[in-house]
Structures are given as structure tokens and as C-alpha cells.
Amino acid sequence: MSVQSSNQTELRGPIQSSDKPLGRDDLARLVARDIKPGSFVNLGIGQPTLVSNYLEPEQNITLHTENGMLGMGPEATGEQIDGDLINAGKIPVTELPGASYFHHADSFAIMRGGHLDICVLGAFQVSATGDLANWHTGAPDAIPAVGGAMDLATGAKDVFVMMTLLTREGVSKLVETCTYPLTGIGCVTRVYTDKAVFLTGPDGVQVRETFGCTLAELQAMVPVPLKAAAAVGS
Amino acid sequence: MLNFVESVGEAVAGIKDGSTVMIGGFGNAGQPFELIDALMDCGATDLTVVNNNAGQGDQGLALLIKEGRVKKMICSFPRQSDSWHFDTRFRAGEIELELVPQGNLAERIRAAGAGIGGFFTPTGYGTMLAEGKETRILDGRGQVFETPIHADVALIKALKADGKGNLVYRKTARNFGPIMAAAAKHTVVQVSEIVPTGCLDPEIIVTPGIYVNSIVKVA
């Protein structure tokens, strides 16, 4: 194993691994590739669900769904559709060999007890120290709905976020301090966006790789100090 | 005391105005639609309802809310693409909402059934859903004190019951059923099939009959 000094990597900048921003499916493929074999994983509603399309059987990943199942299979089609077998987004799914069912308190004990290796969630905002805001815009007329987001954010060993880096108005969702209501404090470890992969934690934000931009160009879009992640050999 | 009743009307007849009613189900999976329809017909109102959601579409819990029978919802995820009846009542200020993170909802229900007076959990620490609640730093993490949710009645759906009231469920329709059965003073279960005592393998029973009061078979 060889570890480059961070000084060296900072000079070289992070790897620009694509000459254009990543689309949703390419990003899902990247997240899927980064999940360690044998992991127990919960994929949030929306964009994170796409990750399941790119998990390889050799990875031996077990998917958890909050409504009481391990070993969840792909979305059900045609005659497979069974109203008693749905995922957290209430979409009919299938079961894989070795699946198990359990009640809601056990399902959340799996999250809250730290048994899940990774959860992948969407976000409105992530702060430089890994605070997550993903459940409520705080708008006065909004009907709030939290579901299992706070349990996942505080319970999983690693919390990955998938989101576009910028809002439609061009404002960075990676922020110094979240302005939307928080889901969890200091819980996010990685942020996968169309323009870069960020590692977040108490030491600030490191950039693992960029897509279609240089570190300097990325820094111009994001209001928190960025540094290149030290490349770690395998 | 366990009763096998002939009709869903008889099963819910004891539910009074102002009761707290737990209703099983996650979305439509495990939702006891026939018992909810009977609750509608029995006329009980001013209800506090505990469910993960606040009704979908134009059936079940959504109709109870539409008809103004529910004064308060305790749930984790009220807002959905088809939660229009809740949305209308909520925007008009006609229904109270206690929003609870889903794991806290499940554990608070479990705590009630297990005789636990409350518990500390990191879920929600530092968020607006912990405002006004007691907090402590335990094991180096901020944690929030949460209290049990008790209920007068639970309405749940299972697949099969035997003559002792033991229950088994089907797939993800199990969800809140087992913990609600334990948490309520009176638990009413609708099942697809009643089998003779001894026909359910004791090793696979999910809810032991001690938690069950009334069973009704629905088609």
C-alpha cells in the first residue's frame, strides 16, 4: 500500500475522472461501485434507489428496506406485483433468496443499533462538517414529513448523499452551515454530485474526484474551503 | 380475554369518542381496511390516530380524516402524492399533527407494550423535532428523551390466527402490527384465515395470543 503525502496531492489536484458532469445513472453506477462487497445497505427514496440497478451479484450486497425486510430484490413487474411486498417508497418489489421479514421496531433497531454499513440519501443541503438537511424546506406552507431519514442519518455507519451540486438557481447545496431544518448533525461521510465526490468530516471537505471541472473551477462554485483528498493506493 | 367475533362492526363496537387508536399498516400494506370502514360506520369521533402515514387516496384512514373523525395524527410521513384529504384538513387547521421520526414512532410504540417509561436515542438530536425535549450526552453522543405511545385500541391486520389468538403475518404487511398489538389496551385483528389451535408451528408465531383481544375473519 502506498500513500501519497497530502502536500503532493494538493499540488496535483484531485483526479478529473470525467470531462463532463455525471448524469444520474453514471453517478448511481459510481456509488454502486464504491459499496464494499458484503455490505448491508439502505437506499433512500428517489435518486438513491437508482444505485440498486448497478449493484453486481458478485458484490453480495444485502438491501434493507425500512418497512421490515432484508434481502429486497428489484422492483416487481407484471404478475410479481404483490401489495404486501413493497419498499419504503411504497413501490412493489421482489424478495431474493435468503430474504427475511421483521416488524418495524426490529427494522429500525437495525438502523439505530448501527448494524447497517451504508445508507444513501438525497439532500437539500450538506454542511462542511457533514450536517444533513433533507426532510423539510422550512417553508411556512410545507407539510413536513420525516419518515426514517433521521434514524438512517444517525444510525448507519456511513451516510452517503447523492445530489446535484447546485440548485436550479445555481446555488451550492454544499454549504458552510445548513439553512434548512437539520436531519442529523455531522453524519454525512461522502457527497456524490454531478460535479465532484466530496469527503466530509470534522476536518472539513476533501475532493476525491471531479467531473468536467478542475478543483479551482469547483472551488469557485462552492462556498466552503476545498482540498484534494490524499490518494490512497490499494 | 379473547373473542372471535362474526363481524367487523362487532369488533370495533367498543371504540368511544376521544379514543387513541393505533392503526397498522405502512401505506396500504397491512392497513386493516375492513376494520377502518367499520370504525367509520360506528360513528366514533374526536379520535387520536397513530399510523405511519396519514392516509392514501380515497380509502381507509384517508376517509376517516376526510370525514373529520380524527382530531390528531401521530405519524412519521403524512405528506404523500395522494394524501389530499390530510393535506386539506391540515392546511385548514382542522387536524393536529405530531410528527415523529419513524424509528422513534416504532420504538415509542414498542416501549408502551414493554412497560418502558421512556428512552434516550440519538435520532432527532439537534433537530426541530427534538425541541423542548430533555437531552443528555450519553456514550459521547447527544441523545433525546422519548416517551412511550399508549393506545386504547389497536386495529391491525394479520394473515392467520389460531384458536389461541396467535398470529402470523405476510411479507412487509407485518410492519407495525406486532408492536401495536402489544401497546394497546385492546387489540382487534382482522385475518384472512382462522386455523385450529395447534395448526400454527409455535416456532414461527410472530404475535403470541396474549396480546390479542378480538379476531374477525374478513373475506
Image: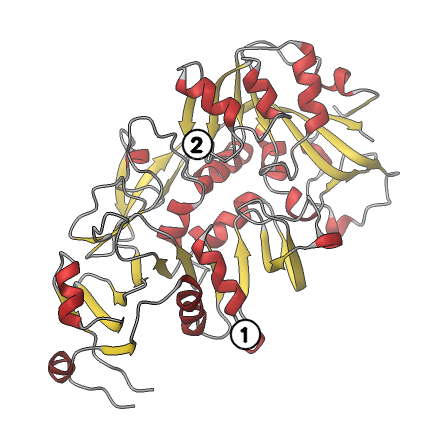
Q: Is residue A183 above or below residue B60?
A: below
Q: Residue at x 81, y 20 (%)?
A: B7
Chain at numbered mark 2: B
Q: Residue furthest bottom?
A: A1
Q: Is residue A122 left or right of residue A175?
A: right
Q: Position of residue A13 (x, y in %)?
A: 17, 78
Q: Quadrant of the N terminus of chain A?
A: bottom left
Q: Is residue A83 above or below residue A159?
A: above
Q: Position of residue A26 (x, y in %)?
A: 41, 68
Residue B14 seen in render: no
Type of amino acid at the residue the image marks with label 1: Glu
Q: Residue furthest right?
A: B196
Chain at numbered mark 1: A
Name the foreground residue: A90 vs A96: A90
Question: Is there a contact, CB below 8 Å, between mark 1 and mark 2?
Answer: no
Q: Is residue A192 left or right of residue B213?
A: left
Q: Which residue is mark 2?
A: B117
Q: Which residue is mark 1?
A: A56
Q: Is residue A170 above or below residue A196?
A: above
Co-location on one chain, circles 1 and 2: no
Q: Residue at x 30, y 47 (%)?
A: A124
Question: Residue A173 shows which numbered tag?
Answer: none
Q: Position of residue B74 (x, y in %)?
A: 47, 27
Q: Is residue B109 above or below residue A206?
A: above
Q: Residue at x 29, y 75 (%)?
A: A19
Distance, label 1 to label 2, CA atoms, is: 45 Å
Which circle, 1 or 2, is nearer the viewer?
1
Q: Quadrant of the C terminus of chain A?
A: bottom left
